[in-house]
Image: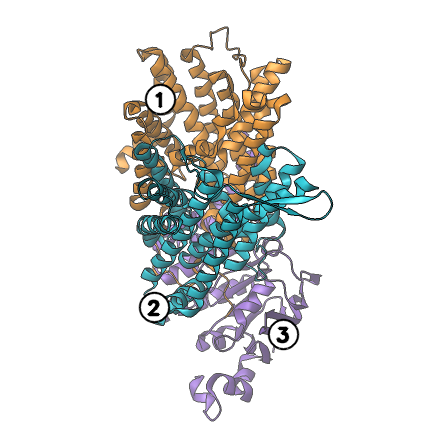
Amino acid sequence: MSKVRALFEKYQALFYVLILAVLCAVPFLLPKALYVRYACNILMYATLAGSLNIINGYSGQTCLGQAGFFAIGAYTMAALSTNFGVSFWLLLPLSGLLAALVGLLVSLPTLKLKGIYLSIVTLGASEIIRIIAQTWTPVTGGAMGIKQIPYPQLFGLDTFRPKYYYFIFLFIGVVFLFVTKRVLASRVGRSWIAIREDEIAAKSLGVQTSFYKSLNFMYGAFWAGVVGCAYAPFVNYIEASQFTTDTGFNVLAMIVIGGQGTLIGPIVGSTIVTLLTESLRFLESWRYVIYAVLIIAMMWLRPQGIAGASNSILAGGKIKRKPAAAGGKGGASHG
Amino acid sequence: MAERKTTLLEAKGVCMYFGGLKAVEEVDMQIKQGDIFGIIGPNGAGKTTFFNVCTGIYPPTKGKIFFEGQDITGVSPEKAAQLRIARTFQNLQLFKFMTVLDNVKIGCHIKTKSNLLDAIVHTKQYKQDEEYTTEKSLDILRSIGLHEYRDAKAGNLSYGMQRKVEIARALALDPKILLLDEPAAGMNPQETKSLMEFIKMLNQDGYTIAVIEHDMKFVMNSCNHILVLNFGKKIFEGSPDQVKVNQEVQSAYFGRGLVAGEALK
Amino acid sequence: MEYFLNQLVNGLSQGAIYALMAIGYSVIVGVVGMVTFTYGEIMMIGAFGAYYVFQFVGVNLPLALLAAFASSFVLGIIVYKLCYERFFNAPRHISLLCTIGFSMLIKNLVQIVFGPEAKPVLNIIDNRTFSIPLGGAVSIDLKLLQIVIMALVVVLAVTLTLFFNRTKSGVALRAVSQNKEAAYLMGINVKRTAMLGNCIGCGFGGIAGILLAIYYYTISTTTWGGFSMKAFSASVLGGLVDLRMSALGGLFIGIIENLGITISSATFRDMFAFGFLILMLVIRPQGFASKKGSRV
């Protein structure tokens, strides 16, 4: 095993280029346009799940409202491009930044809150965003949604064909992975992980936990916004019902199944969930039952997910030598 | 007794109440530059609470804390760490699932300052920081004798070693003062002895150290000044020799009527 | 003015149902010590239990309520075994995600078994309205349905309080909710007691479920997530484990919602509830309760 790893590390760059080449060939190898569409979905959800994984998997804050950030990105793109004809490539970072701003707003009240309270605020915020989208007709089209969102320019290719749109998702996904990998290997990423593992200890080492938690939220929201921006023209039509809490739970399920706290986890999750729900279409509602059972089974057998970080508190905290004392992580007891 | 130098950490009339419980009451303390300052007292005497107040985990109900003459009463733990007050925890708050090296690396947080953008574009700042962090962490691990365990998961080490990792992590802050909360708890006599030597060595390197400890031998042999707490109140302060013969300390520890000299040997 | 007063009455009666939901929720959170995202589906199952009583036995309200309680109670056992029992010492998010999974499971199973379309629940309580004059031209309308609901909620709340204070299991439940370890040392079977508490909480959710169905004349298979959120909100307002305060929180949310839509449109209904919750969490995380800090 260590030999394989050594080999991998030696030819790391080559390895990545190889994977990228294969990924680039995918849309031309798949026999049907429908399959290419699935591939697009996998890439898109992989990045979206990745953005949620930044929050849930790396800083340990259980965010349930990723659909909200996603919606912000999608609506920013749709509204600005249909009304003002702003270029997609300009909107891509803009949507991200706007989502990050909302992420900051959501994170501020959550800083003092723990666990479930935080989750609920994110869920509530996501619902509020959806309700606004549903009612703010002049901007979001209200219940009618926004139709005929212009396709992005890409070297003169017909991006309305999934075959070419695929490359936009691929581009976003690769940039996301590249940038995130760097962030995680830095002081910022270490601080996030430290907060996830033990917030009090992180504080006592001088990590400004509030700042880093907010930053973490903004970073996760940013990428959700970017993916939202790419999603809008892909489906060509958006409305509020595409951004319900169930959408958020769906993304959550991907990281739960695929794995939290690793970069590969969300990709695995997105692939499994997309293939499962698409290939089991004939089962109709039963596929969601299977899906739900999978989530519960995962929590029982491997809480960190298939490719999740086993070396983390996400794995259920089983490393403990001492039996869980009363108060658990409460820390600072007065002696 | 050697001449006592400038005051580093000072507590003035510090009180900490939890509802009706007076965990710490009117405690004064002066830790001088270069001290190994011991805080002892029976269980529940308020030692850890006092530490927590000093490092900003609780704001005191009353009283003031000064660090290098600057009022730091009620600052956040982060701020205290940035002032280079480092601490360890009684009940071990290691990042259990992270490697020993990563644990120490997080300790280097305040000594570095690269941000998100630095990390993304790998600026000079980032490279400097990473180099500093890695070098520094490895140096500390080497000096504390954990170098060969750098890639082990912290939670998998023995109890004594975990305590050492915590100290290593605190050292990464380049602390002006190091507060150790029962560093020898759970260690065997061998480990305790080597820890004691290590602490003395750190002291010789110029670190000021405050230590809460139950192990009397440890305290008497390493500390040059001792504060005794009981039921949240300071009952005595002085050199180890003075503490040994003090009546009140003895009665607090052993009840009245016991010959303390024997027990304290 | 009249519209405003009528909305207040609507708010009170809807708030009464929310109060019942919140009581159930708080019992669960208090005794088990973990939050649930399955509560909406638990209420739905209770509503369905009662619905089939109406279908096969006829309009028999007491029996229907019993059926609602029983079906949610039984579901509570499954939830407990699947989502809580194993995870007492694990990080919180694990059981949380488990309940989300279970909620998806039940939602979809129900759509498969009972069909996705909403079921009508009509004429359970006489559609009679009392008009109470308040002097001048102002009067408020009070529906019989609303009176019955409010009375029922009060009776149930009192029953639960008596149960908690006067019976041995009730006292055990309170002990477990305050301190599991101490309760264990006192010889209480913590796991079984926690399960009982969870099931009782679920049972109350079930009754709230059928009351909601009667109130809206329909049982949908999709809208329960929102109610679950409201139960949670109400219970947060009450400090999450304090039953009386949670009930107050429920009433409050009912009133806020119904008064809120007098100044805007009905589509904003949920926004008022969530907005208020977030505001409350920011300003006063412990809710109405005076004690600071909470177990979750």
What crowding class fits label 2: few (fewer than 14 Cα within 10 Å), some (14-19), or many (20 or more)? some
Task: Identify the secondary structure beneath mark 2.
Answer: loop
Query: Which numbered disc, 3 or 2, marks the residue closer to the eye?
Result: 2
The span from disc 1 to disc 2 (Cα, nearest Å) is 58 Å
Q: Which residue is mark 3?
A: B27
What chain does badge 3 belong to? B
Nearest the viewer among B1 and B106 is B106
Indicate the quadrant where residue C290 lies.
bottom right
Q: Which residue is mark 2?
A: C188
Residue C171 x %, y %: 41, 68
The amino acid marked with disc number 1 is: Ile
The amino acid marked with disc number 2 is: Ile
Q: Is residue B232 above or below residue B180?
A: below
Q: Chain B: what color?
A: purple
What crowding class fits label 1: few (fewer than 14 Cα within 10 Å), some (14-19), or many (20 or more)? few
- Chain corresponding to cyan in the figure: C
Q: Which residue is mark 1?
A: A19
**Residue B140 falls left or right of residue C281:** left
- Chain corresponding to orange in the figure: A
